[in-house]
Amino acid sequence: MIRQGEILNNTYQILDELGSGGGGIIYRARHLRLNIDVVVKQVKDEAKGVQSVISEADVLKRLHHTYLPRVYDFLEIDGEIYTVMDFIAGMDLRKAVQTNGYYPQDLVLNWARQLAEALSYLHSSEPPIIHGDIKPANIMLQPDGSICLIDFNVSLVFDENKRKLTSISEGFSPPEQYRNKMMYDKMTGNTQSRVNAGNLTQNVFTDNSGRSYTDVSTIDEETSQILERTVGRGIDERSDIYSLGATLYYVLTGVKPSSHYWENPPITQYDIKLSEGFSHIILKMMALDPDERYQNGMELKAAFDNIYELDSVYRSYRHRNSVRTFLTTLLFLGGVGLCVAGGITMKRETDIDYVDELLVADQEISEGNYDDAEIIIKEAMRKRPKRVEAYVSETKRLYMTEDYDGVIDYGMAAINGPRFDVKTEEDQKSSGDIVFLMGNAYYEMEEYSDAVSCFKSAIERNKDNGDYFRDYAAALAKEGNLEDALKCLESAKKMGLGKDSIYMIEAEVSYIKGDYSKAAEDFTKAMEYTKDPIIRRRSVSFLSDCYNRLDDYTSQIQFLEKYITQPDASKSSVLYLATAYFNAKQFDKAAEMFKKSIDSGDIQFETRINLSTCYNEMGQLDMAENILLETAKDYPERYETYRNLAFLEGQKQMKLPNEQRNYYTMNDYYEKAKILYQESGAQDNDMSVLEKDIQRAKDGKWIN
């Protein structure tokens, strides 16, 4: 063991001991010439005696990869062997999961791609470098959000015979990493390798997060046979694949895999959002039989590069749209038919994949599979980072998730960056779609002036799109500019729009004129004809409003109850339905919908107030009070909360006999409401009513 302050090779000053890794003791040291922190790792005794270690170490020194630490030196001092590598700042994934819980697919998939690249790099070296101890504790999440795979076992570079002498990380090491069957049974406490074989039983368990999964508690014959022939054979590239798969399993579920491999529920049994492709890759990585896994990092990287092809929706959609894809391909390849050079052939193939991916992404968006769509869009961007179409798809995806702030922020960054090239007229027109979607986001947020500006900008980029004029007219109407709105709608009608847009235009004209019955009829027809998600969403909003203005809550409720079961139903529709129930005085159903809206991320003040009112109307005063007290914490500047608390307290006191009443709490709420009300500058009749109630309490000597 080396001491704190000791200087190795006149270069590395030991600062402190960090711990013990899979290959030996680890120290943090200072590189005195470069003035940076490094890691000095003392290699365990079992790795000593390797012939020509210094010359062989040149393999490690040549390593240079974004997701691996740099190896600075390989030292032999007084019979001890040390490696010197980068000190990687950040938090390892074991601590990250323990601190934050399991992580969502979008983050983990990005890390998985990075780690697959690192393994591909290591496994393609000559000789192949086997990490030998991949686990969450050996993967650092750096401050910039990227991943670094640390602490690979250097002895595995030099001597294949050492591949049976590696350390074991329970839950993350594959069966072949155990030296022999006796060691496996002893370390895992396994007593049923041949017990009850073929007697597979399943039990349902619940993890710490409340998610249920199925546990296979008894080994089956096939698993037993795989263990018999696999344990003790020694590790190779496929062992790294298993360990990384187990690590991803842990990070995605928060559940550490068991070394009783038959007890690990497939990741598909967990209640987490995971694409079909990602699930398939992890299942293959964690196959017990090494022959059934990806055979090396290169194969794993290829799987992640083409992850979307593993989704059944992609395969079926590609088959259904083969003719459409062929025609699209012809458009891309027109004019280059005589070019057969390898580089141009590659570009053709990439363009075909790029278009196919965006077609699939659009299908996923239409079916409400927004996470899957995001993966595919990112893959398309990776292939063609300067093409505008993928940025349009991502803006549309954000719009359909109702992340309207996200639409605006993303759209502004994409347009103003710019993140894409605008080389042709078609590029310019496509960029108009991004601005158009930004306009719709502003529209949904009821910021109509900004919506008008965006629609106007979109029209400047593409004067041939009738949808732009249609929605421009709607925003103008919302601003009160009815004359220009009608002119704009007339322009849109002349542009050869489909039936859905025509019905929508007719509906908007009727709406502007105040003929809500006719507007409702035409919005209904627009929804029947259209497959455009924006038309559907806009029609739902207007149609619900039309029924509301007509006081036809029965029709409004029937329509919305049916709509919210659709795959593309918006979050807003839940709130529309809650309001319809509220207006119809169906307070129990209204409360259920308001709560559902809040649970799905609705943080609006009005939603909380309405939920409290529902409980009040149902006589559940304590529930109403709890909602208001929570609302007061989140919206301390809103007088309405304290106003309602004062009224609620008054109701509670009215239920008591005169001699038991105490209106001091009500008065405290009133005083807080009065101060905030005066600061707000609002005009509110209820505050006058409340003031009179307080005065009556004072007159009755319940308040001094």
Image (spheres, rainbow, N blue to C red):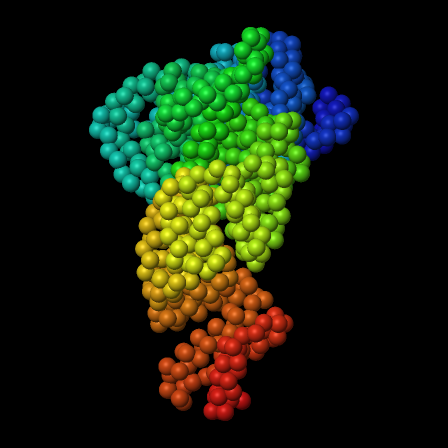
Residue in the image at 34% along x and 69% along y:
618
Q: Quadrant of residue 535?
A: top left
Classify 625 as above or below 21. Answer: below
Q: Quadrant of residue 157?
A: top right
Is the C terminus in the top left, top right, bottom left or bottom right quadrant? bottom right
Q: Is residue 433 left or right of residue 366?
A: right
Classify 273 as above or below 652. Answer: above
Q: Is residue 177 left or right of residue 679?
A: left
Classify 143 as above or below 167. Answer: below
Residue in the image at 50% along x and 25% along y:
355
- Residue 501 visible in the shown view: yes
Residue 64 location in percent, x, y? 64, 20
Residue in the image at 36% along x and 33% along y:
268
Q: Is residue 531 left or right of residue 148?
A: left
Residue 536 location in percent, x, y? 42, 45
- Residue 131 visible in the shown view: no
Q: Is residue 532 left or right of residue 440?
A: left
Classify 122 as above or below 489. Answer: above
Residue 339 location in percent, x, y? 57, 9
Nearest the camera: 476 or 207?
A: 476
Is the N terminus in the top left, top right, bottom left or bottom right quadrant? top right
Nearest the camera: 214 or 647?
A: 647
Residue 125 location in percent, x, y? 57, 13
